[in-house]
Image: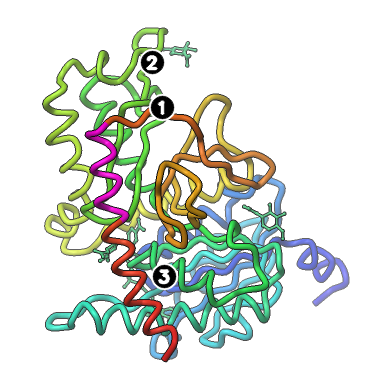
Amino acid sequence: MSICNSILSALALRVLVTGAAGQIAYSLLYSIAKGDVFGKDQPIALLLLDITPMMPVLEGVVMEMQDCALPLLKEIIATDKEEVAFKDLDVAILVGSMPRRDGMERKDLLKANVAIFKSQGAALDKYAKKTVKVLVVGNPANTNCLIAAKSAPSIPKQNFSCLTRLDHNRARSQVAMKCGVPATQVKNVIIWGNHSSTQYPDVHHCVVNMSGSEVPCFDAVKDDAWLKGDFITTVQQRGAAVIKARKLSSAMSAAKAICDHMRELWSGTPQGEFTSMGIYSTGNSYGVPDDLVYSFPVHIKDKTWNIVDGLAINDFSRAKMEATAKELMEERDTAVEFLGV
Ligand SMILES: NC(=O)c1ccc[n+]([C@@H]2O[C@H](COP(=O)([O-])OP(=O)(O)OC[C@H]3O[C@@H](n4cnc5c(N)ncnc54)[C@H](O)[C@@H]3O)[C@@H](O)[C@H]2O)c1
Ligand SMILES: *[C@@H]1O[C@H](CO)[C@@H](O)[C@H](O)[C@H]1NC(C)=O
Ligand SMILES: *[C@@H]1O[C@H](CO)[C@@H](O)[C@H](O)[C@H]1NC(C)=O
Ligand SMILES: CC(=O)N[C@H]1CO[C@H](CO)[C@@H](O)[C@@H]1O
């Protein structure tokens, strides 16, 4: 490597993507490497982790990344070794996890994922920068994120988050289609809780820009029954609907949501807007129990998120927020048992 090149790769942001031979990564890597997430001037070093049997496939992905001829991409390292993949990371996007196979018990699946995220959490603790930002995507994303954070005691828990931005984008888009406006004119939907069918997509604080003025979502949509019924179930079951249609899980939209999540973590949320992400609950907001990774509305500034406080919560919302918290507590308790063994 020339001196010039080694200086450039020293300045490059070190970004890990796990599950790098999979579907989501295939849509994600190009956007990261061309500057959509960390800025058009930010050189990138990509670290790509997958399991040993996938190394030949990953080689193909590396070839394609080279063939994209991207100016910001200074280095690509493909590996099946955690000590290589997690070294000096600025950003870790943990996409790979154990998939559900036919006949696999729910508990066995959770156990396999606890093992993966315990190991990757420990690798973050040992090899990554202490300022690393970690985004967990692989399911069960909330609980995997909690296990990774618990396994990396030297990294602040606020630096861990899990992806509910896809659900947030789905909710935004459903409202936008109903109102006949672009999705960018719909602000401040909220996803509460788990990234699953118990999540609660909440539009009580959402506003829609209708021909130049901001209107509360319920007034813009003018169909309360839909907002309290089919809208919620559509968002909750959207992942399953995509699987049914495509015979594969959401990948393009998941990759886009990962980019949205990371870009705003890096550069902040727009003025007057908040987003949703799964973060570590300390028990101080909206009655959500502590020691859970739960999706909240957040503002982001200076690479730090803050939960949006003081939003009014009615009984309808409260019940749904509690149901998804209860589900997560049960999953956490089982996962933590596996963590000990
Ligand atoms: N949070 C969300 O919104 C959201 C949305 C969509 C998908 N997902 C989840 O994201 C994950 C990936 O989805 P996909 O469609 O890319 O799946 P995929 O099966 O196409 O790819 C997953 C990749 O992860 C790899 N992998 C498995 N264990 C690994 C490990 N220990 N270390 C590194 N790599 C490992 C696999 O070999 C595979 O290449 C799934 O768990 C999926 O359920 C989450
Ligand atoms: C939480 O959501 C994840 C992702 O959809 C799912 O795998 C998990 O089973 C859910 N947790 C519970 C306890 O249902
Ligand atoms: C609403 O949308 C119009 C364009 O349709 C735009 O000019 C205006 O700035 C928007 N207002 C807000 C508050 O975002
Ligand atoms: C997003 C976030 O909370 N980032 C924090 C990560 O940890 C460092 C300290 O190591 C904080 O300064 C960041 O604010």
Per the rendering, the mark at residue 187 is: 1
Q: Is mark 1 within 8 Å of ligand 3?
A: yes
Ranked by sequence position, the earlier of labels 2 and 1 is 1
Ligand 2's quadrant: bottom left
Q: Main secondary structure of the magenta part?
A: helix
Q: Secondary structure at mark 2?
A: strand
| Image-based side of 255 in relation to 238, left or right | right
Tell me if label 2 and label 1 are in contact, CB under 8 Å: yes
Task: Specify which label sits upstream in the sequence, 1 or 3.
Answer: 3
Q: Residue at image x 43%, y 83%? A: 339
Circle 1 Cα neighbour tier, 10 Å, few/some/many (<14 / 14–19 / ≥20): many
Point out the frontmost of discs 1 and 3. 3
Mark 1 lies on a secondary structure that is strand
State the image coordinates of residue 21 (x, y, percent, origin top left).
41, 74
Which numbered dot is residue 144?
Answer: 3
In the image, the segment drawn in magenta is 315-325
At x 35%, y 13%, the residue is 215
Mark with earlier residue (3, 2): 3
Residue located 58% across and 81% down the image:
122
Asked if the beta carbon under badge 2 is closer than 8 A to the nearest atom of ligand 3, the reply is yes
